[in-house]
């Protein structure tokens, strides 16, 4: 068998770059964040916790979390589910990781395919509670570990949508979060994160589109692997800086942009490049949903309903064109189906969780319209932020043609949601289980809770009155 040829100069450059990133991260641990980065980290924390809570209403998530806690050790951290069950840090991180991306309502990184918050936060929450970090230390650990996960996604781009980012980068984010939260030294941090990278997995991107539910478990497994990688690195069992080249470039065949590991480090924080969702599906479909909701408003004003639509044409960007499923078999498949997103928003007038529930899979109105959705390339894809445009055309049965267009969906740095919108989302996602949680998390965002406050005490107050 032929040995894989390595570009030794590139491998060494990547090794130097990640060593510099690891050194900077270890040096920043425990230090206060710039105000803008702190606020963004707090928003990501609040939004992703809400996404975890709402996912625990799903029977499969609830059952999987219960199974993980059966063999748990000491009760040192919380699962963000009804009743706030407790377990050891590894079990609770894996349980929260199972919920992290289930409803497609978690935050994401806009500059590369990467949901860094979902990779970082399950492990971080467990470590912060078990280790009794302060609020400020928790936010700093979030921002720093997010930086590592996002920069790795930028440095190792896939030429095709082959490996899903949740599989590729979850172990890295979790290891970074655990290492920073525990305050390990630079050498251990680098060994832990690169060791975790060697245990990344080749989860197929197509599993999301096909609705294969193991895709939602990658952030669960990633959390456990990342945390254990820190344990092992502390015992001398870790990776080396060049491991990133060996995994991504040699084994997975990605490109390499080594400068992405260090460019403007400490200047442009990766948390500032995140986006938030109010639609419960893949972000690639959000522009089309916004355009569809504009048309639905017009439909309602005319006293009409979706039966007046003969055909829907969605002109969309290259990533949107991958969402081709017309007969989704699971709610995950529906969340990665442009035909379903276009049809459900036209029928129901929403892009929220109600448009992607299991019930919608059998809704005859949606199913019939899904089969009459056509995807075509958009003719005017521009550089960021207008790199994900969608134009939706409704061809009506009476011969009229209605259209609406979005050059980019809301929620990113260029068109951020206002904070009342995000607070309303947090209330909707988590107040039923934890009445005090939305306000508790929002006090952190607004700085009403001081950074010196113990995370464990703040969390206990926020989860007080949990409904089981």
Image (cartoon, rainbow, N blue to C red):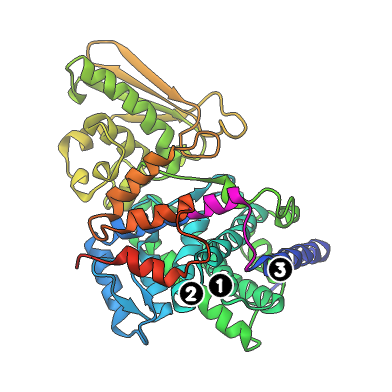
* Residue at the disc numbered 2: 127
| Disc 2 element | helix
Secondary structure of the residue carrying tag 1 is: helix
The structure residue drawn at horizontal position 46% and vertical position 57%, both measured from the top left corner, is 45
Q: Which residue is mark 1?
A: 181
Mark 3 or mark 1, which has the lower sequence index? Answer: 3
For disc 1, the neighbor class at 10 Å (few under 14, some 14 to 19, many from 20) is many
**Which residue is depicted at the point 45% across and 40% down?**
284
Badge 3: few (under 14), some or many (20 or more) residues near its Cα, within 10 Å? some
Stretch in magenta: 30-43
Image location (x, y in percent) of residue 6: 76, 66
* Residue 80 visible: no
Q: Is residue 41 left or right of residue 59?
A: right
Distance (Cα) linking label 3 and label 1: 13 Å
Verify CB contact (< 8 Å) between mark 1 and mark 2.
yes
Residue that sits furthest to the right in the current view: 9
């Amino acid at each position: 068998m032929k040995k894989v040829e390595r570009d030794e100069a590139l491998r060494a450059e990547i090794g130097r770059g990640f060593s510099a990133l690891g050194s900077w991260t270890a040096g920043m641990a425990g230090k206060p964040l710039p105000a803008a980065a702190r606020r963004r980290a707090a928003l990501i924390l609040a939004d992703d916790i809400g996404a975890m809570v709402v996912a625990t209403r799903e029977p499969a998530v609830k059952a999987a979390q219960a199974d993980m806690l059966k063999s748990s050790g000491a009760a040192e951290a919380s699962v963000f589910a009804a009743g706030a069950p407790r377990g050891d840090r590894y079990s609770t991180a894996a349980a929260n990781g199972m919920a992290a991306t289930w409803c497609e309502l978690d935050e994401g990184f806009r500059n590369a395919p990467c949901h860094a918050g979902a990779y970082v936060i399950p492990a971080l929450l467990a470590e912060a509670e078990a280790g009794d970090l302060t609020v400020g230390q928790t936010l700093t650990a979030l921002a720093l570990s997010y930086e590592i996960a996002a920069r790795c996604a930028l440095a190792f781009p896939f030429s095709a949508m082959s490996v899903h980012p949740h599989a590729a980068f979850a172990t890295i984010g979790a290891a970074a979060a655990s290492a920073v939260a525990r305050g390990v030294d630079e050498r251990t941090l680098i060994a832990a994160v690169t060791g975790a990278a060697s245990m990344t997995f080749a989860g197929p991107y197509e599993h999301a589109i096909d609705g294969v539910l193991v895709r939602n478990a990658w952030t669960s497994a990633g959390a456990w692997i990342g945390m254990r990688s820190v344990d092992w690195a502390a015992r001398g069992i870790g990776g080396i800086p060049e491991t990133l080249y060996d995994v991504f470039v040699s084994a997975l065949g990605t490109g390499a942009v080594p400068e992405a590991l260090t460019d403007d480090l400490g200047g442009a924080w990766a948390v500032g490049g995140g986006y938030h969702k109010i639609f419960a599906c893949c972000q690639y479909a959000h522009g089309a949903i916004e355009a569809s909701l504009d048309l639905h408003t017009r439909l309602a004003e005319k006293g009409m309903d979706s039966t007046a639509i003969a055909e829907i044409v969605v002109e969309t960007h290259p990533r949107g064109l991958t969402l081709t499923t017309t007969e989704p078999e699971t709610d995950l498949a529906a969340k990665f189906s442009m035909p379903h997103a276009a049809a459900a928003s036209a029928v129901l007038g929403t892009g929220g969780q109600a448009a992607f529930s299991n019930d919608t899979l059998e809704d005859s109105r949606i199913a019939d319209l899904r089969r009459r959705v056509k995807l075509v390339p958009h003719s005017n894809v521009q550089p960021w932020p207008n790199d994900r445009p969608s134009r939706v055309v409704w061809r009506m049965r009476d011969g009229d043609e209605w259209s609406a267009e979005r050059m980019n969906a809301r929620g990113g740095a260029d068109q951020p949601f206002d904070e009342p919108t995000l607070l309303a989302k947090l209330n909707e996602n988590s107040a039923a289980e934890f009445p005090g949680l939305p306000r508790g998390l929002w006090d952190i965002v607004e700085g009403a809770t001081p950074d010196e406050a113990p995370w464990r005490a703040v969390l206990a107050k926020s989860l007080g009155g949990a409904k089981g």
